[in-house]
Image (spheres, helix red, strand yellow):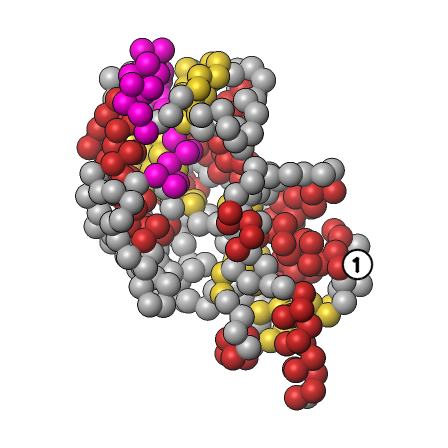
């Protein structure tokens, strides 16, 4: 197999490259050479995927069996379209990393691949879309839906769309699991979002990578939701964070309405916490039938802590600073709760 990975130097892109190399595949990567290091063993090509001349030079280096696009999350649909059009005759297949945010019903409804997708034209610029008053739909979701449409127009039935929710694991750049591990390592009373038995479905980056590489060699088409089939409870998640960090931390479970009263922001200040009914209700039956296999999340937690302790440093990204509750704010809320009890 000869594949082209758009990106390929950090987190999911890097994991995909490593997985493909382990299978003995011929891997080319294309990126600007600014974020992370090229994985040894790849043919590294550098350029700007938003520049037509760079894309034309890239296409001339083909052909490839499959393009796996991991680097379009911050791009408007028109730039995704530019790349897909430039490479449609240089590759037989396109595996596109998208998001569950493309669904009109996320995060309120249980999602299947048949759920309605947001409308966005393939030539839209970065201004298209909006974020609703309650945080849904999101402008990001509109943009990613337009990116999917751009790939469909270029590759048709040769396109596959992976729609993950939250991806965790070693190398994470968003900072969700690293924040919980860092907080657990400080010990003491830990503010936790009740109920403890609420199930979450984050998925390990290495498992998403393996599935993406599987799809690169498959003959399937269309969309696959990618999330952990079993997941774990928030209580077990926090217990695992406390266990691997070997601290004396003790969760203080607080009801959602009380957290909101104290101004705690869902999804960011307490990462992975969101009260919408559908946020962790993603049907992954189609992906499981196609070979998605997910390791127990406790392994993801332990391996991420090992990476952090080994001075794991993700690529700098502004989203890292968005996640986590300030220690002072947490202490103030815990003190107020204790005085009310």
Residue under circle 1?
Answer: 247
Assign the C terminus to one quadrant of the image: bottom right
Please determine whether, in this image, residue 258 is positioned above or below residue 154. Answer: below
Pointer 1 local density, CA inside 10 Å: few below 14, some 14–19, many at least 20: some
Residue 162 as seen in the image, left or right of residue 312: left
Image spot of residue 117 (x, y percent): 26, 51
Q: In front: 301, or 142? A: 142
* Residue plotted at (33% across, 19% down): 54
User: Considering the numbered disc 1 on the image, is that residue within a helix, a strand or a loop?
Assistant: loop
Foreground pick, 164 / 14: 14
Residue 323 is left or right of residue 116, and the answer is: right
Q: Is residue 269 above or below residue 259?
A: above
Q: At 56% across and 29% down in the image, what residue appears?
A: 36
Q: Which residues are magenta?
A: 50-75
Query: Was residue 56 drawn as part of the magenta stretch in this picture?
Result: yes
Instruction: Using the rendered view, name the quadrant where residue 131 is placed.
Output: bottom left
- Give percent across and percent down for residue 116: 25, 53
> The N terminus is located in which quarter?
top left
| Left or right of residue 108, residue 12 in this image | right
Q: Residue at left 50%, top 28%?
A: 34
């Amino acid at each position: 197999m000869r594949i082209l990975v758009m990106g390929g130097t950090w987190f999911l892109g890097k994991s995909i490259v490593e997985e493909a190399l382990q299978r003995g595949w011929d891997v080319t990567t294309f990126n600007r050479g600014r974020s992370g290091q090229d994985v040894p063993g790849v043919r590294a090509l550098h350029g700007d995927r938003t520049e037509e001349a760079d894309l034309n030079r890239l296409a001339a280096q083909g052909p490839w069996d499959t393009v796996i696009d991991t680097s379009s999350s911050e791009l408007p649909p028109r730039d995704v379209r530019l790349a897909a059009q430039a490479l449609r005759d240089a590759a037989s297949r396109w595996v596109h990393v998208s998001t569950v945010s493309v669904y009109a019903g996320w995060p309120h409804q249980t999602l299947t691949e048949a759920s309605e997708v947001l409308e966005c034209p393939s030539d839209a610029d970065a201004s298209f879309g909006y974020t609703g008053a309650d945080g849904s739909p999101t402008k990001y979701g509109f943009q990613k839906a337009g990116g999917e449409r751009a790939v469909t127009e270029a590759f048709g039935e040769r396109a596959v769309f992976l729609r993950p929710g939250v991806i965790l694991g070693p190398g994470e750049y968003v900072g969700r699991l690293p924040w919980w591990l860092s907080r657990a390592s400080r010990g003491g009373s830990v503010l936790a979002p009740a109920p403890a038995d609420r199930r979450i479905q984050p998925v390990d980056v290495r498992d998403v990578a393996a599935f993406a590489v599987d799809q690169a060699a498959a003959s399937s088409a269309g969309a696959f939701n990618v999330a952990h089939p079993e997941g774990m409870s928030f209580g077990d998640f926090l217990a695992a964070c406390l266990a691997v960090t070997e601290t004396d931390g003790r969760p203080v479970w607080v009801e959602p309405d009380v957290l909101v009263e104290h101004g705690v922001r869902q999804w960011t200040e307490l990462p992975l916490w969101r009260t919408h009914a559908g946020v962790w209700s993603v049907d992954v039956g189609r992906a499981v039938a196609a070979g998605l296999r997910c390791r127990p999340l406790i392994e993801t937690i332990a391996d991420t802590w090992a990476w952090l302790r080994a001075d794991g440093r993700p690529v700098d990204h502004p989203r890292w600073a968005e996640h986590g509750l300030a220690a002072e704010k947490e202490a103030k809320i815990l003190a107020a709760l204790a005085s009310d009890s």
